[in-house]
Amino acid sequence: MTITEIQDDIIADFSLFEDDMESKLFYLMDLGKRLPPMTPAHQTEEYIVKGCQSKVWLFPVFEEGKLFFEADSNTEITKGLVSLLVKIWGGKTPEEIMSSELYFIEKIGMSHMIGSQRSNGFSSMIKQMKMYAFALNKAQ
Amino acid sequence: MSSTLLDIDSIRKQFPILHQKVNGKDLVYFDNAATTQKPLTVIDALNTYYSLHNANIHRGAHTLADRSTGLFEATRKSVQAFINANESEEIIFTKGVTESINLVAQSYGRKYLTAGDEIILSQMEHHSNIVPWQMIAEETGAVIKVIDMHFNGELDMQHYQSLLSVRTKIVSCVWASNALGTINPIKDIIDLAHQFNAVVMIDGAQAGSHIEIDVQDLAIDFLALSSHKLYGPTGLGVLYGKRKLLETMPPYQGGGEMIKEVSFEKTTYNSIPFKFEAGTPNIGDVIAFNEAIKYVTVLGKDAIAQYEQSLLTHFVNGLYALQNTFGEKAISFIGTAKNKVAVQSFVMENKHHFDIGLMLDAKGIAVRTGHHCTQPLMQFYGIEGTVRASFAFYNTVEEIDILLESLKKMLERG
């Protein structure tokens, strides 16, 4: 599936909850719980995403020109958010990641919910993932 | 509904912000310890000031300047009455509690502290009553001592007594803790400090809206108050200081208003309070603050405190009920002192406070989550932060039930 298709899928899933923000958040937390556990050795200070209020770890794995991510967070909602990013960008090439536009967050009605302080954290996650893509692209 | 002398329905009508939807739900505002909402009289006063009276105060020959000066100084008189200060010159307008404390630390502290002198603070202080003292201690060589606390959130008064000595020059202590709600026995704290000729600064940020204040009866040396935590505008605070102390203190900032005469050879300073109010003050907000004081005074602190305590009791009982259903560990109370303002902090097992805050926001409920600018206090409890619900007289038991119901739903989900 393309990045656009995955985002559209996520938007369709969340649309079932209409304007019920509480249910959306419960669903988001469930998604976070399904995120595969991180290798403990990767959950270090070095891989903490700077600029998030809650703790987020992101570990990049490069395989055959594609980027995969291990991720975790100490808060359930943030873990849900990062799980969506992993779903969208995991297994994609650096070019695909760097050239993609993320529009799902607004469409699932989360941009105002996340709040300015937390969305800074969300932007930091996005920036960090794009930086890994940039680094892999350069190394290739 | 709790029995109360207050007409909560008509009070709520005076606070327009309360009547809105957040995330599709009626707003439930339980973040009053961070800032209180403003009654129409305060909002209207700001509007009226800028529509009709705006002029720089003092020394103006024209009518508007005369009018705005009169309104500005009227607030000073109101604050004087509100805290029962001996005279209005003892009331200094600042931009908030933080600035009030910094003023005392920088002015009084710099003049009177020398190496080896001691400043006593408490474990439950807000950062704004820690950092200014650390800064002046570093500069002067003074030493900071910290009063221990019991686990329920009450100060260890025996430990406090053991810290006091002839080296103690300043005791600076919060009246009501923002994170725990604990009301500290400031009368005892002050009396004991005075036995050692130490001066006492009281951080009244949280006390102002809940507790009757009589600075003369309590013999408070310095008191800091916040306007925005007292239903007034943001960006405004009060420093009360005894005249005999304020008069010996050097100015804190230089500029207009605070001088008597200026030449390049020598400047002489104005008398109090103007000596400490350099530059054009926050005129509009000071004038509107008068309406906030009037509002609280008309309701009466006793009636307010009684009603808010009933809200706190309702909430605490609700949390106990959740503990009964979901186990004692499901919810832990942070701050169980006997004497409290209407603030309750808590943590939930296996739930991060950020998640709880966002889940509650999804239901239109505003609470504060995090360390509440009291990191040493969080270290004491070995936690990163709490969820804090803080109540005001416009809140209702029905709103508390909405909060309890949301917490219950989170616990049911596990």
Image: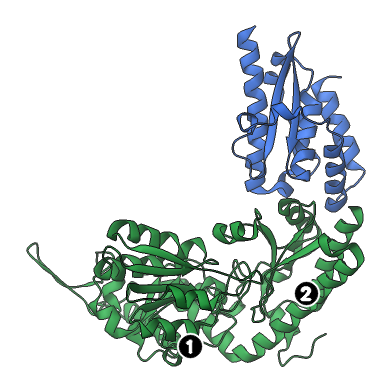
Chain colours: A blue, B green
Instruction: Report the residue at 69% width, 37% height from top.
Output: A56
Q: Nearer the viewer, residue B206 or B167?
A: B167
Q: Nearer the viewer, residue B8 or B383?
A: B383
Q: Position of residue B397 (x, y in %)?
A: 80, 78
Q: Quadrant of residue B209?
A: bottom right
Q: Neighbour class for label 2 at 10 Å: few (<14), some, many (≥20)?
A: some
Q: Nearer the viewer, residue B322 or A27?
A: B322
Which residue lies under the disc numbered 1? Answer: B82
Report whether mark 2 lies on the same chain as mark 1. yes
Residue B65 is left or right of residue A125, and the answer is left
Above-or-below relation of A74 to B412: above
* Tag 1 subunit: B
Q: Give the spatial CA distance, label 2 vs label 1.
A: 31 Å
Which quadrant would the N terminus of chain B be assigned to in this image? bottom right
Outermost residue, left side: B265
Q: Neighbour class for label 1 at 10 Å: few (<14), some, many (≥20)?
A: some
Which residue lies under the disc numbered 2? Answer: B316
Tell me the tag on residue B241.
none
Instruction: Report the residue at 75% width, 57% height from top.
Output: B361
What's the amino acid at mark 2? Answer: Val
Q: Position of residue B380 (x, y in %)?
A: 60, 60
Q: Quadrant of residue A99?
A: top right
Dot 2 or dot 1: first in sequence order is 1
* Tag 2 subunit: B
Instruction: Report the residue at 63% width, 47% height from top.
Output: A117
Instruction: Report the residue at 59% width, 56% height from top.
Output: B379
Q: Secondary structure at mark 1?
A: helix
Q: Position of residue B364 (x, y in %)?
A: 77, 61
What's the amino acid at mark 1? Answer: Phe
Q: Nearer the viewer, residue B5 or B319?
A: B319
